[in-house]
Amino acid sequence: MTTPAEIQFKEVDLDTVAQASGKVVVFVDADGKLDAGARKVNTLTRKAVARLVEGDVFEKSAPGDVVALNYPVGMDASAVLVVKLGRRPDSQAARKAGAQIAKAQGNAELLVLAGTINRADEIALGLALRNYKFDAHKTGEKKPIGKIAFMVSKPEEVAKSAEPMAAIAEGVFFTRDLTNEPANILTTDDFAARLAAMQELGLDVEILEEDELEKLGMRTLLSVGQGSASPSKVVVMSWNGGTKGDAPFALVGKGVVFDTGGISLKPAGGMEDMTMDMGGAGVVAGVMRTLALRKAKANVVGLVGLVENMPSGTATRPGDVVRSMKGDTVEIINTDAEGRLVLADVLWYAQERFKPTGMINLATLTGAILVALGNENAGVFSNSDDLSDALLKAAGSEGEGAWRMPMSKAYDALIKSNIADMKNVGGRNAGSITAAQFLQRFVKDDVPWCHLDIAGTASVKKETALAPAGATGWGVMTLNRLIADKYES
């Protein structure tokens, strides 16, 4: 997998700054006040930093922005990166600054003169997250990112607070890698193998194969993959870091490694993007990796349904009726509404086997959520104000957009079937809501539950604050924060 850059924290030694190679980072607050590191560099460069700060470019820049002084006089560095940031930034401003530093770094070595700036750990997290590059399938020489070091006044304290953030970065990178992988590489077999490898981190990982799924009655899930040569699977990852015997919190992810739409074939234009249709499973995997790496004091189980939706002589047809593990029957109107069929069986299995204290599922489920919310927010649907409020609070704290959407029995009429208990689509109107209503039928009344439709946030065409274009890893930070705040003992 792509590994986040290693970041070292060391004592402040301004006497060595003149000889530092690569790029040196200094911080200046909005009113132009230079901290000790910036003053040292200003002296070395014959007041070049002060002149830059007094100019229009710095004045017009936003908090967190970076302005470069290239080839500074009096220093061995190739550039000085001047960051507009106060000494006490909030976490989002600190992460933004770190991301801007990463964009300006290139492949050079980096020395960050953070001194006494609060949230140096958050600056480091933003830097690490933005320094992601998915180039596994590019040939030719690949230049590694240069060494990164932070000079801080209390390096041991900062390193300790940054340690769980390094676990978050690794979890986000794992999710991004999975979501970015092409479907001929990330087959259901390969996906399951990558998850099984996390046993070395202390996770218990179990892979349920098709014969076991058939015995369990997971026929809606199996119906999605029956047109593909790739076998359908369910992978169960358990982290038991809480009180022994306590029921876990459950995360469930849609893992459609490629979605052609099946017999209800998608248009050719843009179909290549459907390698990201396993984004929900990717987020669950990234969260479980983060929990294991930081030794979270919680019991959490992550379940992902891995399938490929292909057209063939054995594929499910529109008009077929399939029985779920729960026992309800579903009339398949559109085989491109397959994600909810995968989730239905996995949600039911999670409740039957683990009796979870609560449950969240994630899926790149509907184009309708893109119409409603664009790429800025994931859609949140829930049967629990308490759980949804906690989730939205966690998302806000982590700077990941999320917006609660309505649910009510009135929408159930749209998925009423004449020949089965329900149909799998309800037409164009309220498309994301009827998908959530479908899923709710497989959630027991006493189980707090949220459905997150991440079709707009899992992978994007333009860079975001903390990620280049492509997979974002949206949700790993939010769910990790939710578990830390609400479920850790």
Image: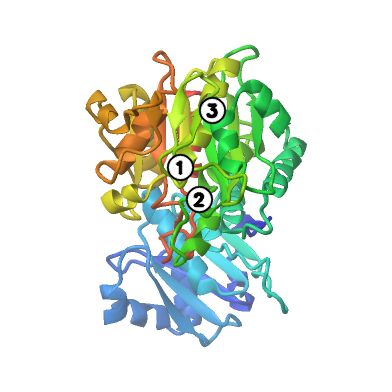
Q: Which residue: 38% across, 51% down?
A: 92
Q: Secondary structure at mark 2?
A: loop
Please tell me which residue is depicted at 55% across the width and 22% down the height of the picture: 325
Residue that mark 3 sits on: 345
Q: Measure the C-alpha gap from mark 3 to mark 1.
A: 19 Å
Q: Position of residue 454 (x, y in %)?
A: 42, 46
Residue in the image at 41% along x and 83% along y: 48
Sequence-wise, the earlier of marks 3 and 1 is 1
Q: Is residue 301 above or below residue 123?
A: above
Q: Are discs 1 and 2 less than 8 Å apart at CB?
A: yes
The residue drawn where x is 63% and y is 72% is: 109
Left or right relative to 293: residue 276: left
What's the amino acid at mark 2?
Ile
Residue 450 showing in the rendered view: yes
The answer to which of 198 and 382 lies nearer the viewer is 382
The answer to whether residue 352 is left or right of residue 270 is right
Where residue 266 appears, as percent x and y from the top left, is: 45, 57
Badge 3 element: helix
Between label 3 and label 1, give the one nearer the viewer: 1
Label 1, residues with CA under 10 Å away: few <14, some 14-19, many ≥20 = some
Residue that carries the numbered disc 2 in the rendered image: 263
Q: Quadrant of residue 105?
A: bottom right
Instruction: Work out whether mark 1 precedes mark 2 in sequence or the reverse, and give the earlier one.
Output: 2
Q: In terms of secondary structure, where does tag 1 sit?
A: loop
Q: Mark 1: which amino acid?
A: Pro
Q: Which residue is mark 1?
A: 318
Compared with 358, 425 (above or below) is: below
Residue type highlighted by circle 3? Asp
